[in-house]
Amino acid sequence: MGHKYTTEQKENLYQECLTLIHGLVEEENDLIAGLANVSAVLKDAFHWWWVGFYIVKNDELVLGPFQGPVACTRIAHGKGVCGTAWAKNEVQIVEDVHQFPGHIACSAESNSEIVVPLRKNGKVVAVLDADSERFSSFDETDRLFLEKICATLENLF
């Protein structure tokens, strides 16, 4: 189960992740390799239920590299938390996914979620999605650092 961290512990973990991710993607230009390693770094650091990427392809989000149980393969624009983050081009933090209108339940184990748009030249090209079995797992600290992580991945696209 995902751990409960103090803000300071979370910030320290994210700083370690940022350093590691920067090193992993600095010399890597393959999209799948880069996203796969980022998923692994975040899963290992935070022990979330699920973490990974959905990539914009044509008019839908298509499952990309991830860590965790089997996931939904395709998500329509504006549908669920991921599709909403894409459509609005803004981070979605959901304390209780069961209260989110149109939530797509890929797993009954997921109770809270954060979705961060990954942009190239201001346009959403993918989203980073993280799910936790705990309610209210994600906050502004997660938003801040996951946006920084996504910004470092722009050159993969």
Image: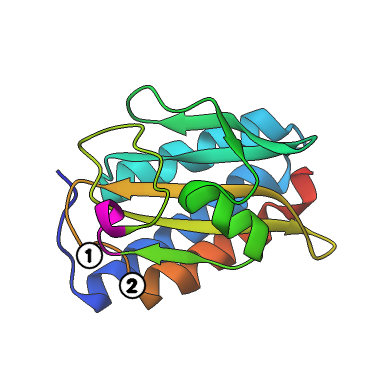
Is residue 80 positioned above or below 72 on the image? below
Is residue 92 positioned above or below 104 on the image? below
- All told, the count of numbered labels is 2
- Disc ID at residue 139: 2
* Of labels 1 and 2, the one closer to you: 1
Q: What element carries label 1?
A: loop
Front position in the image: 134 or 8: 134
Front position in the image: 117 or 24: 117
**Picture quarter containing residue 140?**
bottom left
The x and y percentages for residue 19 are 51, 59
The residue depicted at 54 percent of the width and 47 percent of the height is 79
The kind of residue tagged 2 is: Asp
Front position in the image: 147 or 24: 147
**Does residue 96 show up magenta in the picture?**
yes
In the image, the segment drawn in magenta is: 95-99
- Disc ID at residue 136: 1
Is residue 46 positioned above or below 68 on the image? below
The x and y percentages for residue 122 are 80, 65
Q: Do the residues labelled 1 and 2 touch (CB within 8 Å)?
A: yes
The residue depicted at 16 percent of the width and 53 percent of the height is 134
- Magenta portion: prevailing SS class: helix
Q: Name the side, left or right, on which 36 lies relative to 132.
A: right
The kind of residue tagged 1 is: Ser
The x and y percentages for residue 1 are 14, 43
The x and y percentages for residue 60 are 69, 37
Few, some or many C-alpha atoms within 10 Å of disc 2 (few <14, some 14-19, many ≥20)? some
Few, some or many C-alpha atoms within 10 Å of disc 1 (few <14, some 14-19, many ≥20)? some
The residue depicted at 38 percent of the width and 22 percent of the height is 70
